[in-house]
Image (cartoon, grey):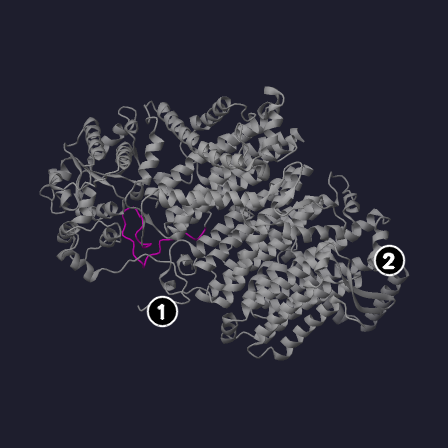
Amino acid sequence: MAPMELIIELILMPLVAFVVGMMMVLMMRRIAAKLQRRIGPPFFQPLYDIVKLHSKRTQVSHGLIHDIGIVMAMGGYIAAETLLPVPGMTGIAEKGGIITLLYLMMIPSLGLALGVGQCANPNGSIGIARALTAMLAYDIPLVIVIFGVAYAAGTTNLVDIIAVQQAGGFETWGAVQMPVLAIAGLIAMHASLGKQPFEIYIAPAEIATGPMVEMSGKYLGGLFVMQCFQLYTTSVLYVSLFLGGGTTWFDFLLKSFLVLAIPVSIAYLFPRYRTEDLLRLMWKWPVMLGLIGVAFVL
Amino acid sequence: MNSINKIPVIEEKRTNPLARVFDEFVRFCRSRSLFILHYCTGCGAIELPPAMTSRFDMERLGIQPMVSPRQADILLITGYVSIKTLKRVILTYEQMGSPKYVIGICSCTVNGGMYWQSYATAKKLDEYMPVDLYIAGCMPRPEAVLAGLQKLMDRIHSGEANSWEDYFRNYDYYLGNQQKLFGENWQTPTDIITEAKHYDLIGEGTLGKHTQILEQHQKPLEALDMRLGHDLKEPTE
Amino acid sequence: MTLTPLDELFLYSGITVLVALLLGRRLPAGWMVTILYGIQLLALMKMAPLGYGGEPISSALTFEVMGQSLSWRFDALSWYFALITLGSALLSSWYACGEWEQRFRQSGGNLWLFHLAMTLNVFSMLILLASGDLLSLFIGWELVSWAGFLLMAMAGGVATKAAMRYITYAMAGAMAIFGGIALVYVSAGSLQYEAILTAASQMSTAHLWMLVILFGAGFGIKMGLMPFHLWQAPAYAETPGPGSAFLGAISSRMGLFAILLVLVKLFGIVNIDSLKIPFTLIDARDLLAWIAVFTIIFPTFTAMKQNDARQLLAWHGIGQGGYMLLGLVVADAMGAAGGLLHVFNHATYQAALFMAVTAVIHRTGTADLNKLGGLVVRMPLTFMVLLVGIIGLAGLPPMNGFVSKWLVYRSLLNEGMPLLFVAAVIGTLGTILSVYKLIHNIFLGQLRVEHDNVKEAPWSMMIPMLILTAIIFITGLLPGIPLAWVASVQQAVGLPVPDYTLGGVESASGSLDMIWVIGVLFAGFGIGALIFYFAGGRSKRVHQLDNYAGGHFLTADVRYQYSDNFYAGLMHLIGGWYRGSFLWLEQSVKSLVEFLSLGMQGLYRRANAEFYLLSTALFVIAWVVI
């Protein structure tokens, strides 16, 4: 690949992720509104929010680590997007593979955890403690699922995993070949989004939005940007693992939005679990399904 | 000073047409994305759920509730403010990031309402912090709340809603009123004067005799700056 | 007689011990010892070709004892472990020899003993690493055990108790090893490696089983493998700061070295693989793999519950040993490389972490995670060291721990071992949780009033920490550097070698190139920083008491910090699973021994001494005859 081409891809991939991610945020809020029989926000609402937050005149910082935390939260995802192939662009997906991507996706959360830690607010610290607990909960089924997919495809290279699925059309999709794993993956993905009923670390009424409690202006804006990336990364990862990636942008985006619509539609019908209930749920059903799915693959 | 119309609108004249388009865009975004912090002190709070939920749906205007003052743009005070509450309201207001707006809902915030004769109630909210908008009524219906919010949005869009600057520029006046109520030892953990200096928002009324009283007894709450400590002298205090 | 480079190394190491012994009471002893470690490292560097596939170098020193020849030689395996040993000794000693040493003396510590114990440890480890046959291995092993005991016990009080526990375990292990050696001698007729190598393929299954159990248990005790892990955390945590950095970095890896040498190189992983456990689907190799995995999980989750920073790190040290063994037991090219690389990586970050925690203790006087907080503004460099260290420990990019763990995961995936894979990942996730607690409770959150005047750690302690930090990052960015040494180790012990590059590993089924990954990661951080610093307005630093508390006015006299029972929600669920079963096991063994000894004592008092002499003699004769 020509270096120029690669550089363009590396710039375009996060940019596309951001724009699509904003649309996903919009979709999420619209779905919530529809379920609650409201009209919902206007089309450009996510953009308005981000621009407004970045245009705040005054905002507080609790120190350098607070700033760096936000930088890491955004930067980690920007880096992760280049490992996630999209139609026509592979970036550096072949240099890392799915395990690296999985670990790279933890960097933003951990950067954020550091930043929140320096805010010296116990609400934030409790939020992070819960977020890490939630990560322990949903990552176990997630790695089982990823193991199954990677083992079935015989590679950890996402580009190859997608190619294997696209080879025989619909029948070779991961979701058709490994339906049990696909279901387990969907549950784990739902939990990784941190939406209800797994919203333990935001919990506005209990710990005042946890990690976001001391975030003002551009700090909160950075987290809004991070949310766009998070939605995009999660749904595109699922599409790449189970729905054959995308051959064209149209079916790629269609799949991504549809996949995301499933957990989001479920989310707004539920209140919140307690932490230990989340753990119990995650370690029981998706793990069981995942292990059954892996047994089929082996 | 305590009336909205008297607050001078300081317009930043920018000659570059692109910059003006950009400013216009930013003002538009600010007006279309408002995060509310409810400080529901009285009965007016009951009118807010309908304004938020399916009947009136605030979110279609880009308004949504937020939890902590750091995240919020609008401080919504619904109902009477007792002196004890007012301390918290002021702290909350000072912790919000500018541009910030205050809306007083119900008659109680305008003039004490039915608590006019109460010894423990702060009567007029705008003596203690700049109020952008009052929505009078006992209590105002959700329609009125939404109409008020739309009015505020228009003012933000046109650049008129900058009373938050008044708090920095005329801090002495507000502090004086606060000291009158809470005594001369009154101090919040936030530091408005250094904040005004930091953001270049010092006005003629920022410092005065009331801030002098504050500075006499104020315990210094400077940010804990990172330091290596190797080549620094021992702190003097 | 000409001195080979190995002899020179022994010579310098011996001189170091002598200097510590004779001059250890003088103040510049620390510096002298440090410089001598440097010289030893240089001597080791003379043997650097070993790390790139060079021929083994033997010592001129040989003995004949009871018909057995004892010899010492260095091959790639010894060189790799010696490099780590001397590197961590050099940096720990450097760390110790400035302000830490003075403080240690003032507070009544015996500096002479400390230096002596450190130098003896290094010397005995070098002897062990150089062993050329099983007898010299055993001698080295005993030396290492007792030198370790000296270092662990020197702090007195709790430390002595922990060290006594260690030496009890270590002696039991030594007995097992001695039994194993005797068994090898019976079957192979010699204790030379070459003879054992040929004999190993002809051994009967029962014989091999006995050997695997005896050697596995003996060496596993040193490594802290389950269920012999209980001694390690308290013993390491109670050692004086730099000593625990050294012990945590390398000491228990001697067990891994011996396992590698005896079980992998001499017996061969294929032979072990053929040992089936009857009525189950698993064989001895699976058993080892599962022991490794349990060693990862249980100590890691025990670490999560610790409230003392050093105990937390020491428990993690046990857990990380599991990854190394796991990689070696999988024994394909990537797994073995990952396991071996993890030895190096673990030494770097574990030493850095212990040093950072010791620096905090040096400045604040406590390692209690509930009595610290917010120190990042006072000790920013130490914070950075600890941060880099925990990223390495948790195995996240961009630090070196990620590469070795990636290799282990990759091999488990290749070999199709889902349960082991998931278990390894659970260990990593648990590590992330517990290291966040570590960094949060020490450096983040609210700064306590009494720590307002705390200063950054002195430069004499800072520089070794920063060097380690640089090593952690550079070997994360360019894992090819240590992978080259690892590859020659793999060749030396007869394991397959992965196709490594400067930036990682090439493989048809998914490669890793850390240069790209880290490059993109930092580019992402750069873009994030651009957005953050230029797309938004200015921000103002505020005091920590200017904080959201639901409208409450915060004051300095009331703590506003979350540190105790950090993962409360998790503990609601798994808290009941901590049953202390292994402690119970240890206790019951102890009571059994006590009971037996009481019984024997009673017998001894009553019966005649002649009877004992007679029965012992009879027993010995019977044993010899049989």
Could you confirm whether marks 1 and 2 are on the same chain? no
Disc number at residue B234? Answer: 1
Q: Quadrant of residue B110?
A: top left
For badge 1, the amino acid type reads: Glu
Marks 1 and 2, Cα distance to the nearest angstrom? 71 Å
- Bin the neighbour count of mark 1 within 10 Å (Cα to Cα): few under 14, some 14-19, many 20 and up: few
Q: Residue at x 47, y 56 (%)?
A: C384
Residue stretch in magenta: C543-565
Indicate the position of residue C512 as horizontal and vertical percent values: 61, 42
Indicate the position of residue A175 as horizontal and vertical percent values: 57, 25
* Residue labelled with disc 2: C186
- Bin the neighbour count of mark 2 within 10 Å (Cα to Cα): few under 14, some 14-19, many 20 and up: few
Q: Quadrant of residue A288?
A: top right
What SS does tag 2 mark?
Answer: helix
Question: Is B25 in front, or is C82?
Answer: B25
Q: Is residue C221 left or right of residue A216?
A: right
The chain letter under disc 2 is C
The chain letter under disc 1 is B
Q: Which residue reaches farthest right? A: C625
Q: Quadrant of residue B52?
A: top left
Query: Is-magenta flag for residue C254?
Result: no
A262, above or below C516, in the image: above
Numbered disc in front, either 1 or 2: 1
